[in-house]
Image: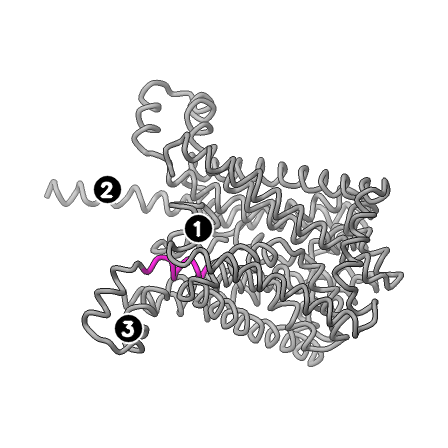
Amino acid sequence: MRSFNRVTALPPPADLMAIGPNPDAAPGRSVRSGIWLTHILSLLFLLIWGAAASVLPDYLLPGPISVLRLAASLLTSPLFLWDAFCSVWHIAASIALALVVGMALALTVHFVPATRIAINGRLNPFLSSFSTIGWIFLSVIWFGLNDFSVIFVVAVTLLPFALSNLRTGLEQLDKETVEMARSFGHRKTRLVGLVIMPLMVPYIFATLRICLGVAWKVMLTAELFGGTSGLGHLISRARAEFDTPAIFSVILIIVVFVYASDKFVLEPMQMRLRRNYALA
Amino acid sequence: MRSLDADASASLAPRRLRLAQHIYAEGLVLVALVGWWAMARTLPPYLFPDIAEVFRAMVQLVGDPAFAIHTAASMSRIVVSIGVAMLIGGALAVLGRYVPALHDFIHQRLKPVLNSFPSLGWALFGSIWFGVSSFAVIFIQVAILLPFTLINISEGLREIGAEEQEMARSFTRARRRVFALVVLPMLYPYLIAALRISYGVAWKISLVSELFGARTGLGYLLMDAQTKGRIDIVFAICLLIVVFYVAGDKLIIEPLSRLYRARG
């Protein structure tokens, strides 16, 4: 994501920083007909899926009802819940790692301007152009098949995203507040702990939200090749048995879970944060 | 004379900073190389190959016509996928912006699903449905890139307010002229942003598509090297991908984004 920092004329897209009014709000007029059309088109999509599935064999395209039923039975199976738990743990650990390292690097650039090119011009481009698959294969060779491999791969994939976004946040901090705080004391640790970190909360949260989205996208691949647990590993077992319906169900559960957690937990939290920080 | 001196010392400070920055930057590269060398000395070669070995593998790869074919396959797929993803994402964004009835379907149904769909899911579906083919790879990559282009282009279209359009329309009623002279230039930075993100994601994430859906391409080559236990080749390909990425960024994406700045 270094792109945004290079082209300074560009505001970051709303999904990165969520600036301004709710970007998904419908534009006023004809909202009514929009709602109906939305439902009709969604239904139409399900119908087409069902029709195609009734013609095609199950290993190519299972129908929506059987996928839903399988998903429901998966959700009550302890084996599935264990894998889901492992995936959530992998994601939490890797995001925490990426945020801490990203924050440390961003603060280094902020306070030691001499490191700017080293981090922004060498490390970040290298990380952001290093292929995730490359990391997966390397970590499997280095660390073997285990949780650490998965966490390492996801964290190192997230790091450039975290670094770029946190850096943008630091650049956008209210300069006068920081200046004033600086005039009260010399200690940088106090400045960071008492002023910069609290001011950075909305940006850290926005970064967290982006990281979550990217993490879910790449983690399954990491688990499939480098893990011994987690949903990616579950998919790998299903794939070995040509169990396409199981793959569909797991992905359906993931899509619903990711969407719901973003929409009903993270988005309201972010709105509230932005209101509290008078950014909205 | 005094003012000249002041100027000189003022310009000296940034120059000194610049020098320090370069010392740190090249120092970091040096430290990384020394670290690599030290790791390669302490670890066995099947875990951590030394620099000379990887360099030899890189030279060998670059000189190998088969590698050129794999690289060309990956690059052409990426170019086609980005193009298709920009077209479809752009079309959906335009529909969502100018057909209010479709706005909710695109932004509250399609976009969230695309955005939360794991890339492995597309990779598996693509290879199940379309087998091992370039079409499968392109399908997978387009599906992975689509949410990024859709989000960025919609964002750009949202930025073009009703007032700008109304003003443009008060000057001419030719819709095509309004689009070409007002909408497109205002949209350009967002198109570039969409292009940049797609380019990064394509190299980083969507090479996954070549693990399942192809017998050619750099992703396939990486997997092949890994199954053969040739870690020197894995290293070499990863580094070459970094080189290709940076070259494409500097030679294509950068000039394109400067084009806009020159206009603006």
Image quadrant containing the C terminus of chain A: top left
Is label 1 or label 2 in front? 1
Q: Which residue is rendered at x = 69% and y = 48% of the image?
A: A153
| Residue beneath disc 2 | B10
| Residue beneath disc 3 | B178
Looking at the image, residue B176 sits to the left or right of residue A199; the answer is left
- A205 w.r.t. B85: above or below: above
Q: Which residue is rendered at x = 38% and y = 54% of the image?
A: A28
Is residue B177 one of those drawn in magenta? no
Q: What's the distance in space between the residues labelled 3 and 1, CA to CA? A: 26 Å
| Residue beneath disc 1 | A25
Q: Main secondary structure of the magenta part?
A: helix
Give the mark count.
Answer: 3
Is there any visible trace of residue A42 in the rendered image?
A: yes
Instruction: Identify the mark nearer the N-term, 2 or 3.
Output: 2
- B180 w.r.t. A47: above or below: below
Camera-nearest residue between A119 and B97: B97
- Numbered disc 2: secondary structure: helix
Identity of the amino acid at label 3?
Answer: Val
Q: Are marks 2 and 3 in contact (CB under 8 Å)?
A: no
- A278 w.r.t. A22: above or below: above
Residue B140, by quadrant, is bottom right
Is residue B157 one of those drawn in magenta? yes
- Numbered disc 3: what chain? B
Q: What's the distance in space between the residues labelled 1 and 2, CA to CA? A: 50 Å
Is there any visible trace of residue A140 in the rendered image?
A: no
Identity of the amino acid at label 1?
Answer: Ala
Which residues fall within the magenta stretch? B152-160
- Numbered disc 1: what chain? A
Disc 2: CA contacts within 10 A as few (<14), some (14-19) or many (>=20): few
Looking at the image, residue B109 sits to the left or right of residue A20; the answer is right
